[in-house]
Image (spheres, rainbow, N blue to C red):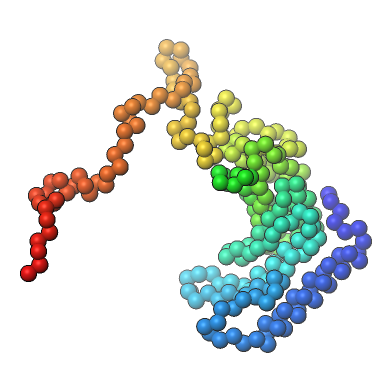
Amino acid sequence: MYNIFSTRRSATFIATFIKRHIHQQRRLLQKKTPEKDDVQVPLSQFCLNPIKTGARTLKPHDNAKRQQLYEFGLYVAACMPKYVQKIQMQHTDELEILVAPEGLFPVLSFMCHHQNACFNTCPCVTAMDVLSREYRFEVVYNILSMRFCRWARVKTYTDELTPLHSAYELWNGVNWYEREVYDMFGVVFTHHPDLRRILTDYGFEGHPLRKDYPLIGYTEVRFDDELKKIVYEPVEYAQQYRAFSLDSPWTYHSNFHEGFDGEMPKKK
């Protein structure tokens, strides 16, 4: 467990500083009465613009809870400025914390053990692959606070060679989730008790959810009647299946009508 505050004075100073700026900006926003056609721009990064939902079929936003959760994100960023890179709110009223790769475990430990957070559940860990980025993999931890009934999302980035610290010490349930990320994307986790494939076979080559992985794969599996066992063979793709027609199906349909390629009649 990481000790964030050495004394109580530092914690009190950070909380007082954030609240002071937030209350000042709220007073300024209350005094200002913009017109209907004006675009409301926040006067400070400490306050969020209220969201009004006109459609009755959509869930209304609780602006007070959004502001409270955003203030907590600012509190996390003020406590750990070395690791937290950005704080943002999503349209689903969920907090997103973007952290550096080396700060993933410290931030997750803070969110798990701090008395004002208590995110004691991590029901989902996933990743995505973006080839155009230098750090192509984006790893996402969705965490839930059972005490305050709030969702948060911690994001980080990595590449094929840079490992990430496992969150198994905080939540034992992420064991299978991190194994799935390793199996599908090839992201390596350190301090993991059993990092091996979970969805594919042990002799599987490559990682299926990478963008540079071919759709047909590298090997195929079939049952051999002579050997009476399952064999692995390289994929054989017949040439007749490689010829694709890029024409629209409406082109073939128009061939059955006479005069489809004739000149348009002139207007009288």
Image spot of residue 157 (x, y percent) = 66, 47
**Depth check, front residue: 199 or 213:** 213
Q: Is residue 135 left or right of residue 228?
A: right
Residue lying at 33% horizontally and 27% vertically, measured from the top left: 239
Q: Residue furthest left?
A: 268
**Depth check, front residue: 268 or 256:** 268
Residue 81 occupies quadrant: bottom right
Residue lying at 86% horizontally and 65% vertically, measured from the top left: 11
Residue 63 occupies quadrant: bottom right
Residue lying at 81% horizontally and 60% vertically, measured from the top left: 79
Image spot of residue 67 (x, y percent) = 68, 71
**Depth check, front residue: 248 or 192:** 248
Image spot of residue 53 (x, y percent) = 53, 74
Number of numbered discs on residues: 0
Residue 210 occupies quadrant: top right
Image spot of residue 49 (x, y percent) = 62, 75
Q: Is residue 168 left or right of residue 264?
A: right
266 w.r.t. 113: above or below: below
Q: Residue furthest top?
A: 226
Quarter that holds the C terminus: bottom left
Residue lying at 75% horizontally and 79% vertically, measured from the top left: 23
14 w.r.t. 162: above or below: below
Asked whether residue 227 appears in the rendered view, the answer is yes
